[in-house]
Image (cartoon, rainbow, N blue to C red):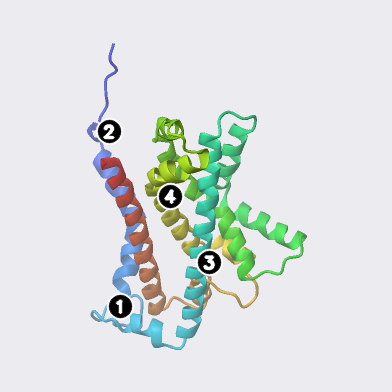
Amino acid sequence: MAMKSYDLRQYPSFKAITIFCLFILYAPLLVVTVYSFNDSVSITNWEGVSLRWYAEVFTGAESEKFKISARNSFVIALIAATASTVMATFAATAILRGGRFKLRTASFGLISLPLMVPEIVTAVATLIFFNAIGVDRGLITILLAHIAFCIPFAYLPISARMQGIEATYEQAAMDLYATRAKAFTRVLLPLMMPGIISGWLLAFIVSLDDFIITNFVKGAGVETLPTAIFGSVKQGIKPNIMAISTMLLGVSVVMVTLSWLISRRDNNK
């Protein structure tokens, strides 16, 4: 007997609940974006459309601080995303293509654990670890913490892509006298590339936007863009902070859209 399929859209109040959830999620972002173009110094009074606060970000009194923190954020995100993606690729290959081994399930659980543990717990644990081994906090500690935190985010799309690739491709390559290394680099790796790119983009945006872990493991005088924004907000919300937030939101949207387009293009193929 075939199971009856259910269309969630037919449930009562489904449309109203969906609109309400979308409003809760995106209304604050929309408000910040709109008021970043407000010509007024006040964040509540609208006095016309202007780009003065975007210019303030690059030429104002706090521009140097934001430039340094933005450079730190992008450099850390680039390195952390690359390192975590490489590690996630090797981890996915070992777990999904390494055959059955005793700690296979435990290995998957350890990789996925940071996704389930509250980020504040990870931040505190990372801080305690660095203090225990006597490492001075700074850009290096931020980078190491971001690499560890980004691995599961990179692992998810990479492992999902690998699970969709039949092992027969590699077996056929080895039947044609390719070594396991060549079968991996010339057959499996190119097929995995859409998942690897999606994993890198996801890890990059997670690292770029992270505040909690960064705030715990950064040293004195070291800032990334999220921590610099937080420091400025403590002195009062200013229109230039809305402009920075909007630009950071734009980068996040672009990265997530690229990841989605790559995954969609790969699925269509």
Residue wearing tag 4:
196
For disc 1, the marked residue is 45
- Quadrant containing the N terminus in the rendered view: top left
In the rendered view of the protein, which quadrant contains the C terminus?
top left
Q: Looking at the image, is 131 positioned above or below residue 7?
A: below
x, y (%) of residue 16?
26, 44
Mark 4 residue type = Ile
Q: Residues within 10 Å of mark 2 (few under 14, many from 20)?
A: few
- Of badges 1 and 4, nearer the viewer stands 4
Q: Quadrant of residue 11?
A: top left
What is the x, y in percent for residue 36?
Answer: 33, 74
**Left or right of 9: which side holds 236?**
right
Looking at the image, is mark 1 or mark 3 earlier in the sequence? Answer: 1
Q: Residue tagged by mark 3?
A: 76
How many numbered marks are there? 4
* Front: mark 3 or 4: 4
**Vertically, is 63 above or below 159?**
below
Q: Residue, x 41% and y 56% (percent of image)?
A: 201
Q: Amino acid at mark 2?
A: Leu
Mark 2 sits on what residue? 8
Query: Mark 1: which amino acid?
Result: Asn
Report crowding for label 4: few under 14, some 14 to 19, many 20 or more residues within 10 A (C-alpha): many
